[in-house]
Amino acid sequence: MNDTIVTVVGNVVDAPRRNNTQNGAVTNFRLASTARRYDAGSEQFVDSGTFWVDVECWNGLSGNVAGSLSKGDPVIVQGALTTHSWESESGPRSKPRIKAFAVGPNLAKGMSVFKRSGRPADAAGTGVAATGEPGPQSGAGPVDDHATPDQPVAGRDYVGDESALHPLDADDLDPEPAHA
């Protein structure tokens, strides 16, 4: 397999669009990534060129992206870079496209709250969901996705010897300035 795997940091430039196809659910959005460089002449950072790319997200990722992203959100996208080609009145055309494997918020630009989505449990108890990926029960028994957030659950949260965890104190939480 000679896929070109890329990671692009940028901003969502249009509202994600979700559609159901015969191949499954797909969510598409456009991403803009603008490079910055230091200009010695003006002694400041300036915008360089902008890379525009369409992103397609399939199946489980499709629903999570459609329910999580909005126009303007800073994101990080990892996936396979391809070229979408078509014929137009003026001849052959093409543009880049990423088939996303993972999409997430760019936490350098803000904070996020993660909510785990439920996965279909496997019927045989093997810990592998219908997608062939490890299911929520892998290795630690069933996971209760409806547990309260303050209640640790084996297989989802760390449950074990508390001495293995490092204590957290106020000195560890020194705020950093937003702009240096």
Image (cartoon, rainbow, N blue to C red):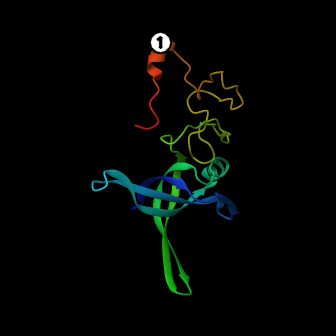
At 68% from the left edge and 32% from the top edge, which residue is drawn?
Answer: 145
Task: Let me know if residue 37 appears in the view.
Answer: yes
Residues 11 and 39: in front is: 39
Query: Residue 153 lies in what quarter of the image?
Result: top right
Local packing at callout 1 (Cα closer than 10 Å; few below 14, some 14-19, many 20+) is few
Residues 124 and 101: in front is: 101
Q: Work out which quarter of the rendered image holds the C terminus and state it.
A: top left
- Residue 164, given in percent of the width and then of the height, sits at 46, 16
User: Looking at the picture, does residue 122 appear above or below residue 77?
Assistant: above
- Residue 74, given in percent of the width and then of the height, sits at 53, 49
Q: Which residue is mark 1?
A: 163
Number of numbered discs? 1
Residues 38 and 8: in front is: 38
- Furthest residue in direction left, as rendered: 40
SS for tag 1? helix
Mark 1 belongs to which amino acid? Ser
- Furthest residue in direction front, as rendered: 42
On the rendered structure, is 47 left or right of 56?
left
User: Looking at the picture, does residue 143 appear above or below residue 124?
Assistant: above
Task: Let me know if residue 166 appears in the view.
Answer: no
Residues 102 and 67: in front is: 67
- Furthest residue in direction top, as rendered: 163
- Residue 156, given in percent of the width and then of the height, sits at 59, 29
- Residue 157, given in percent of the width and then of the height, sits at 58, 26
Q: Work out which quarter of the rendered image holds the N terminus and state it.
A: bottom left
